[in-house]
Amino acid sequence: MPSTIRPATEADQRTIRSQIRKARLPPMNLQWPNFVVAEDAGQVIGVGQVKSHRDGSRELASIAVIPGRQREGIGTAVISKLLAREAGVVLHLSCRRELEGYYKRFGFRRLEQAAYPPYFRRTTSVANLIMRFFGIHLIVMRRDTGG
């Protein structure tokens, strides 16, 4: 487990970008004020954010943990901190279909495509067209204010 989970600072921006790139996550909209970071012995070992979209939806995104520290509960701790910070806010996320069970334990439920907010309708349909060649399918999930 990390020794600290804290709001990111401007000094963390380069590390955030690096961790997202290494995790092969989409590198868009990586603004440090949206992030929390997990830190252990002065090293950032995990990151995550909640970001806003023009359609008014808010997204849990960019959850990444450094190799060698995965499966220690760091990602869970980052998500829990973000959810506590966003209490009372409806959140969405997009993820690979096989991660649905992981996010269910945080109160997220899978949406049918017709219920996707406009941002997710656009991005997920384009991403799924490309990713189907790699056997990957993205889904959208929602967490209501009660969790």
Image: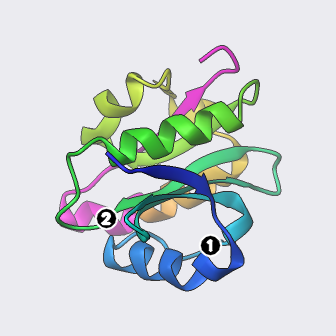
Quarter of the image for residue 139 reads: top left
Task: For marks 1 and 2, give the one nearer the viewer.
Answer: 1
Q: Which residue bears the numbered disc 2? A: 131
Q: Seen in the image, is 119 located left or right of residue 128?
A: right
Question: Is any part of residue 121 visible from this angle?
Answer: no
Quarter of the image for residue 142 reads: top right
Measured as percent of width and height from the top left, residue 59 is found at: 63, 47
Measured as percent of width and height from the top left, residue 130 is found at: 36, 69
Q: Which mark is residue 30?
A: 1
Placement of 64 over or under 114, stated as above or below: below
Span shown in magenta: 128-147
Magenta residue check for 135: yes
**Quadrant of the frame with the C terminus:** top right
Placement of 82 over or under 125, stated as above or below: above
In the image, farthest residue toward the top: 146
Q: Amino acid at mark 1?
A: Leu
Placement of 88 over or under 33, stated as above or below: above
Q: Amino acid at mark 2?
A: Met
Quarter of the image for residue 8 reads: bottom right
Residue drawn at (19%, 58%) of the image: 135
Task: State the scheme by which the image is colored.
Answer: rainbow
- 144 vs 134, nearest the viewer: 144
